[in-house]
Amino acid sequence: MKKKKETKASETHEESLFSKEKIVTAMKGESIHFALGLLMVIFGVYLLLAFTSFFFTGGADQSLLEHPEPGELARTDNQIQNVAGPRGAQLAQFLINGCFGISAYAIVVFLIVAGMSLMKAYQFNLLKWFIGCSIVMIWLSLALAFGVQPFLTDSFIYPGGLHGYNACQWISSQIGMPGMFLLLLVTAVLFALLLTRKTIWVVRKALRPDLSRFKRKGKVQPEATENSGNDAIHPESAETVEEPELRQPEEQQMSSQAVATEEEEKAEEASEDTTARPFEQEEDEEPSYLHSSHSNDTRDARVVELEPTIAEPVASRPTVTVETTSQPSEPSFEISDEIHEDDEMLHGELTQPYNPRLDLEHYQFPTLDLLKNYNDNVPAIDMEEQNANKDRIIKVLRSFGIEISSIKASVGPTITLYEITPAEGVRISKIRNLEDDIALSLSALGIRIIAPIPGKGTIGIEVPNANPHIVPMSSILASRKFQETTFDLPVALGKTITNEVFMVDLAKAPHMLVAGATGQGKSVGLNAIVTSLLYKKHPSELKFVIIDPKKVEFAIYAPIERHFLAKLPDGEDAIITDVTKVVQTLNSLCVEMDTRYDLLRKAGCRNIKEYNQKFINRQLNPEKGHHFLPYIVIIIDEFGDLIMTAGKDVELPICRIAQLARAVGIHAIIATQRPTTNIITGTIKANFPARVAFKVASMMDSRTILDRPGAQQLIGKGDMLYLQGNDPVRVQCAFVDTPEVERIADFISKQQGYPTAFMLPEYVDENSDSGSVADVDMNRLDPLFEEAARLLIYHQQGSTSLIQRKFSIGYNRAGRIMDQLERAGIVGPTNGSKAREVLCMDENDLDMRMKGLKE
């Protein structure tokens, strides 16, 4: 009887635990969030109507609201004129007159913002909005009570509410009216500083006004012309300076100040107005969807403690623990005022950092509603299955004379990890050799034994779940870990066996090898990589080079050509499918890599991150050829087919990119379904430290990819091993279907993009025939011949792609113009991967050559 009571008590306890867990899971569901958000929006609109109507009907309703008779407001003929009825009138009377005055509208704003965020119609950072609305409401309440209240003594409305009136009266009694004004001013400036860095520039302008406008009204001394040559004049404004100014002694100490003229100041103010941007785009330039209140910020690691019994194993009480990830700190952003030696032509005070996203300032990041949600994405613990597996594991080990002291189960979406602690004196190799026996006992589709688990004193047995669950891409991208990541190139692959979001930084990988048999999730994994990058990076920060020998796998990304794709200048399609174009593209990327290294060398930087930071801080001169460098991610599918058709022509540039391109922001991802040694050579493996292995057919294939067995024991359908370092991590790849990718590509393609795809530099094969220049007909010069010549003289760089970009013409026409320029002696012959030498040094020399051509 006692045992039965204990059994019933334990079952009752388990049922209560599961009921609580179901309630918590239901509260996290999307339907609950949507319903709650809808109610908040409706209530916010209701308050908006009540507040607005209060200003017109509050006087008539005041006597009824302040001294109502019992039950008077509940009657149908209550005589309340507010459009929101007596309850709305009461709310308006309380929140406006009784609390915060007109600033109570901030409550309406926050309710609508929070409701929209919960409904996923728009995405906001609710913490920032709550703090901001609260500060605005309190400050505005004090400001209205201080500045407006004295003039509305006969009105029924308190502009600052009783809160503002009482607080203003007390503060004024302590620090006086001037002190109250200064306090309001300082708090307003500090709050504006939190919103935008432009506040610093405005305050500096206010504290140090420019007096040059008043100086222009006086006469200029004749001696000023002698010192005018020492003044640094900006090239754009040099022609507009008619009278030089007499420099003051203080100004002679500021070498970076330009000659102050009215025309310069107008141009300066216009440029500052165009570069200034609101807070949402200046601070960290995070995508709007990253500030979602609906974030799966928990790891949902379901850990079940299973204690083995010595005599007869019985079901023990499970304990479920949920761990949360800590929120990372906000990265500090600091602008350096150090001037680089290449910036001798840049003068004047630069207060605004360069923002590469302003090229497409209205670009909107894809929203989470483009992805599909699955109801079964949260794995539920089947205690019957867990206890049965535990009993079988204990039974098999005991039959071979192995005793264990504890066993613990971590339930993931598709795999459950059983951690066992063997008794004293048990050899690990003895358990490792029982892999097939345990699999037979569990009737499982392949198990994997980790003996021991790195960093723990336990042995792991990975067992496939009877009812696996899908890991949707939407749950990965909505997680706090992805939203608040500081990775340069965040790649979200899926979830681990402990249900934790698994992410890697491709910029630190720095290259990735993906392999797996056909139909095991390799293409879905590549789509997950591309999707996670599209959700995090702006088109100005990232470009893809996609090589698809199958011609159909990545065609869905063709619509985003003008936003994210890169191609050769003469390429028709941005998705490269022709083998000859593949070789040209890879060699063109090598040219781009060499060009970027030259820029880094001139800038004195070691990697792309330092270089872009200097360029953003305006420490590099664009007139010297410097420009913002986007990351380039190369994705090559069916690498084995390319090796078979092109061989060394493909392998050599790939190896060169893998060895050198990391520092300049070029990263490669190659995928193959044939992980053999003639495809994945030793050189490839040495330069691709990050490996992703889906299920393969044999142990030999697993050793080729991971240098160890294990990939042949995976269960397929996205089950994979990720290796970067010593030990592989088992991950269930996030599932993103083709229709989801199509919706994302369509969403991006409908927005404003660049005129063309990102053009890679031209590549000229040194072994190709270059004697065709002699056949150029100089009697039929291109109409753009002279303009192109002046362009190359100005830049002192002979590049076909430069002509193509500046004049928006095709590559073939630009190539013919370059051949004519070479025949005319304006540029030199091709010099391998480097730009042509410009032989014509100035426009006078060009005019003489043009006269000779016309004669």
Image: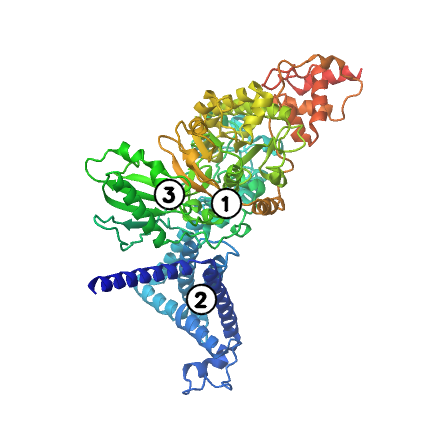
Tag 2 secondary structure:
helix
Rounded to the nearest angstrom, the CA distance separating label 1 from label 2 is: 45 Å
Q: Which mark is residue 463?
A: 3
- Image depth: mark 3 or mark 2 in front: 3
Q: Which mark is residue 735?
A: 1
Identify which amino acid the numbered label 1 is placed on: Phe
Which image quarter: residue 444?
top left
Residue closer to the observer: 383 or 80? 383
Q: Is residue 279 visible?
A: no
Identify which amino acid the numbered label 2 is placed on: Ala
Sequence-wise, the earlier of marks 3 and 1 is 3
Placement of the N terminus among the 4 image quadrants: bottom left
Q: In the picture provided, is 165 more to the left or to the right than 5?
A: right
The percent coordinates of residue 213 (x first, y second) are 54, 42
Q: In the picture provided, is 714 more to the left or to the right than 11?
A: right
Rounded to the nearest angstrom, the CA distance separating label 3 from label 2 is: 57 Å
The percent coordinates of residue 626 (x first, y second) are 53, 28
Identify the residue under disc 2: 104
Residue closer to the observer: 108 or 783? 108
Q: Which mark is residue 476?
A: none
Above or below 753: residue 312 = below
Q: Is residue 394 visible?
A: yes
Tag 3 secondary structure:
strand
